[in-house]
Amino acid sequence: MTEPKSVTASFTIAPKAMIGSTGYLSLYAAYLAAISDATIMTIDSAMPDIGLNINVALANGKTVSIKGGYKADYKSKIGLQTVMKGPLIMMNSQKAELHITC
């Protein structure tokens, strides 16, 4: 029992945004894939480098809701915030709506 042992592990990066059961590596990718009235869930910022770096142009008239603060499994929240870094640009905003809930 004293001989060296070797262990192999693999990890999957938690998506930064999710619609239903489909994960996306960015809020922008989730927005592009969203249909109108979709809810985009975003991960909390408890883990390093998970804050959303966004430069989303809402120009195509979709109405989406963004709900933040989810744990990596997207099944629960523990009270941490989703940090959104960068500009959120709403172009042609008379046709677009954005609802943000934390």
Image: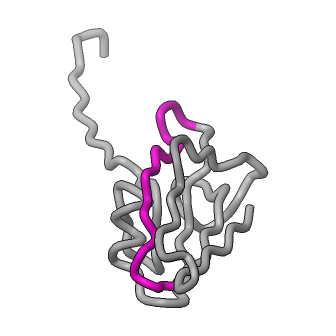
Q: Nearer the viewer, residue 34 or 10?
A: 34
Query: In the rendered structure, does residue 51 fall within the stretch colored magenta?
Result: yes
Q: Is residue 13 left or right of residue 84?
A: left
Q: Position of residue 56 (x, y in %)?
A: 43, 59
- The answer to whether residue 95 is above or below residue 66 is below
Q: Image quadrant for the N terminus?
A: top left
Looking at the rendered structure, the number of numbered marks drawn on it comes to 0
- The answer to whether residue 20 is above or below residue 100 is below
Q: Nearer the viewer, residue 43 or 63?
A: 63
Say how the picture is coloured.
one colour
- The answer to whether residue 3 is above or below residue 16 is above
- Tell me what residue is drawn at x 34 percent, y 64 percent: 29
- Farthest residue in the bottom direction? 36
- Tell me what residue is drawn at x 42 percent, y 64 percent: 57
Q: Is residue 74 left or right of residue 12?
A: right
Q: Position of residue 81 (x, y in %)?
A: 70, 47
Q: Position of residue 93 (x, y in %)?
A: 55, 76
Q: Is the magenta region chiefly helix, strand or loop?
A: loop
- Tell me where the magenta segment starts and ends, as one range: 47-62
Q: Quadrant of residue 2?
A: top left
Q: Nearer the viewer, residue 20 or 83?
A: 83
- Farthest residue in the right direction? 79
Q: Nearer the viewer, residue 25 or 79?
A: 25
- Tell me what residue is drawn at x 55 percent, y 36 percent: 47
Q: Image quadrant for the C terminus?
A: bottom right
Q: Position of residue 73 (x, y in %)?
A: 52, 60
- Tell me what residue is drawn at x 64 percent, y 49 percent: 82
